Each structure stands twice: as C-alpha cells, then as structure tokens.
Amino acid sequence: MTSAAAAIQIEQDHKRLDGKALAHEIRASVAEQVRVLKEAGWTPRLVSIAVGETDAAKLYIRNQRRVAEQVGITFEERAYSDRVTQEELLAAIRALNADPRVTGIIIQRPVPRRIAVKELQAAVHPLKDVEGMHPASIGNIVYNELTLGPCTSVAAVELLKRTGLELKGLEVVVIGHSEIVGKPIAFLLMSEGATVTVCHHMTRNLAVHSRQADAVFVAVGKPRLITGNMIKPGAALIDIGINQIATDDGAKVVGDADYESCHEVAGWITPVPGGVGPVTVSILMRNTLTAARLQKQHYEAQFTGS
C-alpha cells in the first residue's frame, strides 16, 4: 500500500464505531466493581434459560459465558428440551426468583413458537431482570429510569454517544419498531432530547425519512436493506441487524445496512459483526452487576429493618 493510500485508509477508519473497544471499556469497569462486590460477600450470578437447540442461542450463550468469566460473574446455563411446557418454565423462573444466590436471569431467544416468551419475561422478578425486558423495566424508560435498561437498545444508544453528537434536538430515524429493540431505542433517545421518527414495514417512502436524519438506527432483520443513497452525508448509522447470507465461500454475517456503500456516505458507522453485538453483551454484564447491588441493598434493608 502506498503512503497516500495508507493515509486515505486511516482517514476512512475514523468513521468506524468500534463496538469491541467500547465493550472492553465497559468490561474493565464492571470487572473492578464486581471485585469490590465480591469482597463484600456478594457474587453476581447470572442464570441463562434456553429452550431447544438453535445455533444462534448457542452462540449467544458462548459469548455471554466468556465475557461473564472475564469480569468475574458466575454464569450458569439451564438448557431445556423442545418438549418443556410453559408451566414448567414458569415454575423454574419462580424458583430462580426465590433463590438469593441468583442475581440475574436471562431468557435466550429464539424459543419455540408455542412458548409465550413475553409471559416468561414478565415472570422474572424486576430486580433480576438483567435483560431489561420485564414490562416494568420497559415502562421505566418512559420516565427516563434506566437502572436496568434493555441491553441491545442501551448498547446502540451508547455507540451513538461515542460520536460526540449533541443528542438534544438531533434528528433521528429508527427503522424497526419491535418491542425489544426499536421502540426502546426511540424512548431512550427521546429521553435524551432527540427528535425521533420511527419507521417500519408500513412506512411509505422510507428513504425520504432516512435521508433527513442526522442519525439512523436500523433493526429489521433484512440484509443490506439500507444503502448509501438512503442516508444523509455525514450522518451516523447504527446497524443492529445480524443476518447470515450465502457466499461463494459458504456464509457471511452482514447487517441491515450495506456497509460498503453506507461507509462512503456516513460520518460514523457500526460494523457487523463488531459493532452493537459486543457492547450488548457488556451491557448485560453491567446490568447483572447493578442487579446484584440492588438485591444486596434490598436484603440488607430487610436485615437491619431500615
């Protein structure tokens, strides 16, 4: 590579929002605080509940276990067969809620279609809801209470903050209105003072909206849906999609944005993989730490009668 080409490459790389670097910073802080908590006699313990056999869930669990071990959080996996009933899962969750040694519970997705995952999430005690998906946790976002915020949504907004853009008055378009990602992102951004437009599969002229935005979040599960001509020059693009596509070499993981064309236009862009994903796992660990602290305060208050 010539020196001129190298200089161009370095200049372009500043656009890339490095999720791995941010995740490392969060993990380092969590690890130190976990160490202090352990010295006080409290070990955060995260229990994973998975139903059936899916490659996606296995990958998530491996990543969660690895990061948990790095920061000193005990990770326990509970794997249930496809034949498990809704009532059996609810009973398992109730037992974990009652176990003072368990400080966090995460329900892995996907689950079989016959399993009502929302009912499972609602069964998790709010103090152990480290996913931030209990109805109370989601509702708290409206009041700007983010003690245990939804991990992916918080991770995506944290990456936008890394750009240094002033969120107050920022024009933001969120593409995707799911309960677990799109809607929480919109509420998080509104609590920061941003002006938010939420688009979805019923939106007409999507590109008209996205081209006007200072920042675009996309989470719809459609590979390379967003192209460079759909975003405003200099805008921030936060890609939350994770899709596997076939290639001549086998398979490749891509986001909901076409990275190459969007990189040419965007001021900042998250890669897939290596963007929102690593930060999400680190936020999960931060939530697990927070949950352990809250439970410690709860039990101490009961013991002292204060």
Image (spheres, rainbow, N blue to C red):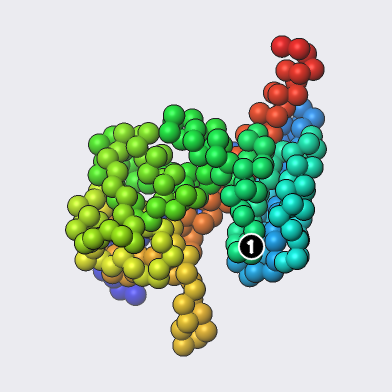
Residue at image position (63%, 35%) is 126
**Residue 223 visible in the shown view:** yes
Q: Nearer the viewer, residue 298 or 16?
A: 298
Horizontal side, residue 234 vs residue 189: left or right: left
Report the side of 109 relative to 263 (left or right): right
The x and y percentages for residue 65 are 69, 55
Q: Nearer the viewer, residue 137 or 19?
A: 137
Percent position (x, y) of residue 162?
Answer: 39, 45
Q: Nearer the viewer, residue 267 or 64?
A: 64
Residue at 74%, 52% (x, y): give it: 87
Kind of residue sitting beneath label 1: Arg
User: In the image, is residue 265 above or below residue 183?
Assistant: below
Expressed as whole percent of the image width and height from the top left, the position of residue 57 reads 63, 63
How many numbered dots are placed on residues in this image? 1
Quarter of the figure with residue 219:
bottom left
Q: Against 82, is 171 above or below?
A: above
Q: Which quadrant, please, contains the N terminus?
A: bottom left
Q: Secondary structure at mark 1?
A: loop
Q: Quadrant of residue 103?
A: top right
| Residue 34 makes an appearance in the image | no
Q: Residue at x 25, y 56 (%)?
A: 210
Camera-nearest residue between 209 and 252: 209
**Vertical placement of residue 25 versus 126, above or below:** below
Q: Residues within 10 Å of mark 1 (few under 14, many from 20)?
A: few
Query: Label 1: which residue?
Result: 114
Residue in the picture at 44% in, 70% down: 254
Report the side of 99 relative to 180 (left or right).
Answer: right
Q: Position of residue 127 (x, y in %)?
A: 65, 34
Quarter placement of the C terminus: top right
